[in-house]
Image: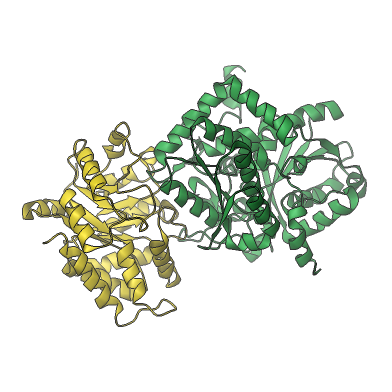
Chain colours: A green, B yellow
Amino acid sequence: MVQSDLQNSLRVGPDEEGHFGIYGGRYVAETLMPLILDLEKAYADAKEDPAFKAEMDSFLTHYVGRPSPLYFAERLTEHLGGAKIYFKRDELNHTGAHKINNCLGQILLARAMGKKRIIAETGAGQHGVATATVAARFGFPCVIFMGETDIERQKPNVFRMRLLGAEVRSVTSGSRTLKDAMNEALRDWVTNVEDTFYIIGTVAGPHPYPMLVRDFQSVIGEEVRKQMQAAEGRLPDTLVACIGGGSNAMGLFHPFLDDDSVQIHGVEAAGLGIDTGKHAASLTGGTPGVLHGNRTYLLHDDDGQITEAHSISAGLDYPGIGPEHAWLKDNGRVSYYAATDDEALEAFQMSCRLEGIIPALEPSHALAHVIKIAPDLPKDHIICMNMCGRGDKDIFTVAEALGVSL
Amino acid sequence: MTAPTRIDKRFAALKQEGRSGFVAYVSAGDPDHDTSLEIIRGLPKAGADVIELGMPFTDPMADGPAIQASGLRALRAGANMNKTLDLVRGFRSGDDDTPIVLMGYYNPIYVYGVDRFLADAKQAGVDGLIIVDLPPEEDSELCLPALEAGLNFIRLATPTTDDKRLPAVLKNTSGFVYYVSMTGVTGTKDVNTDHVTGAVARLRSHSDLPVAVGFGIKTPDQVRAVGAAANAAVVGSALVSKIAETLTEDGRPTPKTVPESLAFAAELAAGVRT
């Protein structure tokens, strides 16, 4: 890449201090700061190490099952009558979601850094399951922090984590959901900083986490580039992904940021509706603030107190968002939308009936957006949506929402 | 350099007296605004040499259960940044000497607006700031503007701050250095005084600033032991737990709240006076 291209690229962030424009940074307690600097160095070393990449690639192939397929959703396309819709099938990964891509990278870093114990936060439980999985595979003791409210609504995943040997610690502080699980994980980390590696599940937290999680998830978008070339001989016209913290979206989007012909849509959780205040749409309904180690868009009141997010999907139920998304919103490269609980539920059912795919409630939000935009687009317009998780874990929530007792 | 703050003067006076100081932490507005003001007003007489006033925040990542609960009590009772500054004003109307340090997290300040916050805090009679989630890497956010505004910016040094990093941590620190006695959150483990003695010696080899030690100090004996090693001992969780003990089940103050909290503060303060 020549110098002028590099300066114009949207893919070179963050800067050395971990900033994407005004977002990102390292807003953490001093106790953690030396460790964060160590992690930054360990990651820089790993990126230069061919053996690290070779091991990562081998596990992605043989353990995760990558590449995940790019699937033409033919019946959905016919039903909507407009754009041609593809799903990136990351729900077919081992553990049923994209989360494992990142966990694998981080556990290899933990091992390289000589850490002895793994902790993680989880909302829907997908990141917790993925973390417990790699901890089992690499022989680390593992503690997963999960809000009491989420434990209640994601029982199958809680049991999965326990089967995998992880201790699931119920978090009863605050709103008892994902943000509180993250607070509690940070408290554990500060206490056990010498021997513990914190596997953050999304593109948020202090630098270098947003960068390294994005890099580990970028395998999604890199595969889509190749697969779409093979399927259609060109790049897609529109990318769509759901956003809680934003890791599956960043993984799909990042390899395409410099391709001007590709429109990029992120879909947040509008919960009961943005105007009700009961939503999890930090970009659509929030303002910049500082939480969990980074500056980003947050849901908070005029006193800077964090407000509770709401979504039918536990994985989107977070009052913040990755700082790179905040930056991409401000500079206009990515357009951000929101889908309500009801819209996601409808999309969930449409995917089940038309494509035989039970999606997680998280990508059901992305699908709800696809359902809105596809009918008005021409038939040669290609949409690629990230089907980032499967819905087995959500059937109880969906049954309850539909008034069905199991 | 700017003029000496109340913090500078207080530590100079303690040196003259030949004793260490007692720093008392309470959350602003816990259990409610008026009771909190009464407690804060009574703290100097109870023996607090410096008052650390917590700015309540919904997500206090470095705090243990006692201070989390105290901040949430305050928020439920209507605490916010304006009311915290009102408390400082209310205190200052009767005491122009005891230093007040605001302690907390950055987001409420960021949302209030940094310049407006610094001006209002200074005007209200705040002397220093301890902001847990602003390490030296983020000095341009608040630390440098605060120093410019004539407030002390008190940095936390921790067991993980090694000799290589310590100069960066101390560089823009003023008033005193706050040594966090352990890796952990507030109010959980007990302080290890042997570790503290060594750590304070290490800090003093890098800086002439007074050293206050906090985290894990709960009893008068621990105050005495830490006071013997450092320039001041900080007690927070134990004090707010004492406040909690005196409340009704739904967190409202009782006639015991103010006197018992201040009596406990006096017991702790005796640790640096005997």
Q: Nearer the viewer, residue B119 or B236?
A: B236
Residue furthest to the bottom in view is: B255
Residue A378 at what x, y percent from top left?
87, 40
**Does residue B214 show up?**
yes
For the image shown, how many numbered marks are present on the structure?
Answer: 0
Residue B240 at what x, y percent from top left?
33, 67
Placement of A320 over or under A223, stated as above or below: below
Residue B55 at what x, y percent from top left?
37, 60
Specify the quadrant that holds the C terminus of chain A. bottom right
Specify the quadrant that holds the N terminus of chain A. top right
Residue displayed at 71% across by 29% down: A259
From the viewer's perspective, tell me whether residue A105 is left or right of residue B8.
right
Q: Nearer the viewer, residue A313 or A243?
A: A313
Residue displayed at 66% across by 60% down: A274
Residue displayed at 73% across by 40% down: A94
Residue B5 at what x, y percent from top left?
19, 52
**Does residue A221 show up?**
no
Residue furthest to the top in view is: A2
Placement of B134 over or under A154, stated as above or below: above
Q: Nearer the viewer, residue B18 or B40?
A: B18
- Quarter of image, res A204: top right
- Quarter of image, res A299: bottom right
From the viewer's perspective, tell me whether residue A10 is left or right of residue A398.
left
